Image (cartoon, helix red, strand yellow):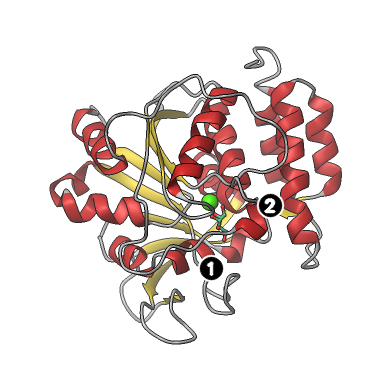
Amino acid sequence: MNRRPIILDGDPGHDDAIAWMLAKACPELEILAVTSVCGNQTVEKVSYNARRVCTLLGIDAPIAKGKRSPLVGPEMNAPSVHGESGLDGPPLPEPVMELDELSSVNLMAKILRESDRKVTIVATGPLTNVAALLLSHPELKERIEEISFMGGGIAYGNWTPAAEFNILVDPEAAKIVTGSGIPLIMSGLDVTEKALMMPEDFERVRAVGGQVAQIVADWLEFFYGFHKTLGYEGAPMHDPCAVAVLVHPELFQLKELCVEVETQGEYCRGTTVGHDRKPANARVNLGVDRSAFADLLIEAVKTYKEDSHE
Ligand code: RIB
Ligand code: CA
C-alpha cells in the first residue's frame, strides 16, 4: 500500500487525541511526526498530553513542542471544555518518550526536507505552527501535499457567534495558511457539528474492550459532558474529521470555495468567510454520513484490542 505520510499538529485536547487514535489505526497513513500547539491548553500542557497520547496509542514518531503563543494575539485556552490539564478524565500512562530537541517548526521543516514524498499536514489546533513554518521556510511549501485542518465555519462560530476556536486563537496564522496556495481541506463546524458520536456509540466503543477502548470511551463521555450542557445530542468529533476526510472522502461532502479569514473587527475577528466570488483556495467540508463516520471510529478502536498498548 502506498501510505500517505502525515504530520499531526494539534492541541490535545480530547478530540485531537481521538483524531490521533484514528490516524494511527489507518493503514493508509504514516505518521512521520507529532507537533503540539498552544490552544486548548498551554503548550507545556498539550505537549505533555501529546506524549501521553502517543504512549497510549503506540505512535512511534518524534514529538516537538510548538509555539508558546499565537503569532499576534493573546494566548487563549479552553479549560471549560478540556479541563485544567487539557485532557481531563481518565488517567493516562506516563510518557515513554521525551520531546524532540527541535522546535515544532524545525521538526516539521526537517521532515519535509528529508521525506522522499510530499507530506500532508493534519492540523487540529490553531494554525500557529503551520503558519510559522510557512513564514520561516517558504521554500518548503512545495514539499507539502496538502493541509487538512479542523477550523472555522462558513455558517457560524462556536467560541464567538462568528468565529470557531482554532481560527479565533490565531486568525493571522489562519490567514497565512488560507493565502498560501497549498491545497487545503477545511473541516469546520459546518461538518464537525454533524459528526457526532452519540451516547450509544460511547457504549459501542467501551464494548470493544481493552485499555484504549476504555480510555477513548471515557474521553467521549468527558467531551460530551461539556457539550450536553449546550444541548448537543452527542459529542462533536471536530478533529477526527480532519483525519477521516483523508482516508474516506466518500463519507463527506466537499465544496470548492474561496475561504478568507477576518483578522480585524470587534465582533468578527476570526471569522472564516466562504464564497465563490474569487478563485477557490480550499475544499470545504460541509457534510458527513454520521453513522458511517461513527462506525469508522469504532473500527479504529478495535485495531488496538489485540496489541493493547499497556
Ligand atoms: O472548535 C473546535 C476545536 O477547538 C477543536 O480542535 C478542539 O480540539 C479545540 O481545539
Ligand atoms: Ca484541537
Q: Is residue 24 left or right of residue 122?
A: right
- Residue at the image position 65 percent from the left and 51 percent from the top: 83
Position of residue 71 measured from the top left corner of the image (x, y, whole percent): 31, 62
Q: Against 45, is 186 above or below?
A: below
Q: Nearer the viewer, residue 164 or 72?
A: 72
Provide the secondary structure element on which disc 2 rests. loop
Q: In which quadrant is the N terminus drawn?
A: top left
Provide the secondary structure element on which disc 1 rests. loop
For marks 1 and 2 on the same chain, the one whose residue lies earlier in the sequence: 1
Position of residue 123 measured from the top left corner of the image (x, y, whole percent): 43, 49
Q: Is residue 100 left or right of residue 29?
A: left
Q: Nearer the viewer, residue 155 or 215?
A: 215
Dot 1 beta carbon under 8 Å from ligand 1: yes
Quadrant of ligand 1: it is bottom right
- Residue at the image position 80 percent from the left and 60 percent from the top: 228
Q: CA distance from mark 1 to mark 2?
A: 22 Å
Residue furthest to the left: 139
Q: Which residue is mark 1?
A: 164
Q: Amino acid at mark 1?
A: Glu
Q: Amino acid at mark 2?
A: Asp
Position of residue 181 measured from the top left corner of the image (x, y, whole percent): 25, 60
Neighbor class of circle 1 (other Cα within 10 Å; few <14, some 14-19, many 20+) is: many
Q: Are marks 1 and 2 in contact (CB under 8 Å)?
A: no
Q: Is residue 22 visible?
A: yes
Q: Against 141, is 50 above or below?
A: above
Q: Which residue is mark 2?
A: 289
Residue furthest to the top: 307
